[in-house]
Amino acid sequence: MKRYAMIGDGLSHVGFGALAAAMALSASPLAVALPVVILTAFLLLRLSTNNRIHGDAAIAMISSASMAAGVIVISLTSGLNTDFYNFMFGSILAMSRTDMTLSIILSFVVLVLFLFSYNNLFAVTFDESFARASGISAGFWNAVLAVIASVTIVLGMRVMGAILISSLIIFPPLSAMRLFGSFKGVTVASAVIALVCFSTGLFLSYALDLPAGPVIVIVNFLCFLLFSWFGWLKKLKRA
Amino acid sequence: MAGLISHFFSYSFLLRALIGGSLVAICAALIGALC
């Protein structure tokens, strides 16, 4: 809604570069990737507010440079092996207990944030100038959003990989927006669509013996087409 | 179909993937609604 849809894509590519560096340094992937992605998120927000470089150009520049650096680091160290494939396309079935615990903590934080700061998030998302005039610290809430988006992307990279993680960020709200007009409607519907599409995609990938990440993306895309059709029918009825 | 579903839920790694992945997917969708 803030027209930062591609930020997820950009940050996941940065995460890929950071994971490659962590692998080369034999460091913990999460300990390296998380601070790097959070710093990049702040940098992208700053670049887009300064208007020196437009938001989409800044994202494209940083993401392609990070991706290129990651591929170079990997080819210089371990070569293009299974780890490389897992970074790119995820390894959902290799999800550890730690990953699951982190996911539970993250979702708890995000849900608490939505429940208790709904009005602030709503104001900052739709009109930053209005939010500032109302005494809401837009800078603080943008920073909170940047941190949570970074943590979600780094954790999501384990599930979907650097290439496909942005689909989890982009598809559910886009599908929800075909049918719902209010912010509350879109957020609730996005969460439900994400849950249904993810579970369906995972189960289908298991039943059809196909890779989980791409099947989840295709299910999300089909859901978007279905919701677009429903949205078109809704408009037709009104006319 | 029922057999396939019960088989699916008998594997702990699939359950971990389902729970952990679904929670990450929900968070990503909520973040997406704000972005």
Image: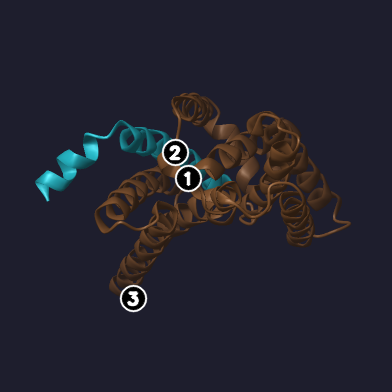
Chain colours: A brown, B cyan
Residue type, numbered disc 3: Ala
Q: Is residue A18 above or below residue A9?
A: above
Q: Is residue A42 above or below residue A207?
A: above
Residue A79 image point, x, y percent: 68, 52
- The residue tagged 3 is A239
Contact? badges 2 and 1 (CB < 8 Å): yes
- The residue under the point 37% across, 48% down is A198
| Mark-to-mark CA distance, 2 and 1 | 5 Å
- The residue tagged 1 is A91
Does dot 2 land on a helix, a strand or a loop? helix
**Residue A94: mark in rendering:** 2
| Mark-to-mark CA distance, 3 and 1 | 47 Å
Kindly report which numbered mark, 3 or 1, lies closer to the viewer in this rendering.
1
Determine whether, in the image, residue A112 is placed left or right of residue A30: left
Residue type, numbered disc 1: Ser
- The residue under the point 74% across, 40% down is A24
Q: Residues within 10 Å of mark 1 (few under 14, many from 20)?
A: many
